Amino acid sequence: MSQGRGDSPEKTVQIRRCSCVVKGGRRFSFTALVVTGNSQGKVGYGYGKAIEVPLAIEKATKQANRQLKDVPVVDGTIPHKVIGSYRSSKVILIPARPGTGIIAGEAVRAVVESAGVTDILTKSIGSSNPVNLVKAVMDGLQSLRTRDTVATLRGVEL
């Protein structure tokens, strides 16, 4: 499921087989959803399509490495509760105390582990499509703010 390459381990969340009916029968192609991160506050996802599985995973990994985003991680968890949404998928991300672990489904777990979060509670609502769930989690993680960021935005000292 996970392959280590240097400082950015990748997690293959989903592989799908697509078929196209042609004159001689069926032609198959594959899609791969991959999440990468450095476990220190950077995470990205990629979606690749190809005729063979390894090529699809390679394309998705390249795209994920190009789209790495910064995520604030405070003491192994997120700074505050947040709801991320994409289309009909919603994911509620709740900070947890140390020792709680990652309480999440497969797609959400891959993203938060790659970001370096060790303690978090999550709940997905709506569509359980892994592609939409990954995008919803990324939306939620992008809207997180630390105390220092909020203080500078407001021009106040906390």
Image: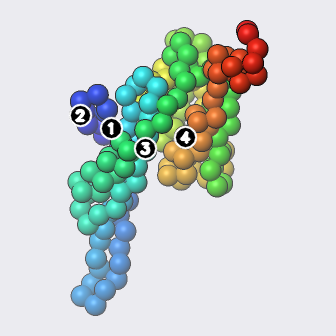
Q: Amino acid type of disc 1?
A: Glu
What residue does disc 1 label? 10
Mark 3 or mark 2: which is in front?
3
Task: Tell me which label, 4 or 3, sits earlier in the chain.
Answer: 3
Point out the frontmost of discs 4 and 3.
3
Name the residue: 34% across, 62% down. 49
**Local secondary structure at mark 1:** strand
Residue type at mark 3: give it: Gln
Query: Who's the residue at 51% across and 38% down the image?
Result: 108
- Residue 12, located in which quarter of the rendered image? top left
Tell me if residue 91 can be seen. no
Residue 25 appears at what percent x and percent y?
27, 84
Looking at the image, what colour scheme do you see?
Answer: rainbow
State the image coordinates of residue 66 (x, y, percent, origin top left).
Answer: 38, 44
Cα gap from disc 2 to disc 4, whole angstroms:
22 Å
For label 4, the SS is: helix
- What residue lies at 48% left-to-right and 42% top-to-bottom? 107
Q: Which residue is mark 3?
A: 67
- Find numbered disc 2 in the image and state the secondary structure of the residue it sits on: loop
Q: Is residue 22 above or below residue 88?
A: below
Name of the residue lying farthest toward the front? 155
* Mark 3 element type: loop
The residues bearing labels 1 and 3 have C-alpha atoms spaced at a distance of 13 Å
Name the disc covering residue 87, or none: none
Eye-nearest disc, 1 or 3: 3
CA distance separating discs 3 and 2: 17 Å
In space, the residues marked 4 and 1 are separated at their CA atoms by 16 Å
- Earlier-in-chain disc, 2 versus 4: 2
Q: Which residue is mark 4?
A: 138
Position of 11 with respect to 143 (left or right) is: left
- Mark 1–mark 2 Cα distance, whole angstroms, equals 8 Å
Q: Amino acid at mark 4?
A: Met
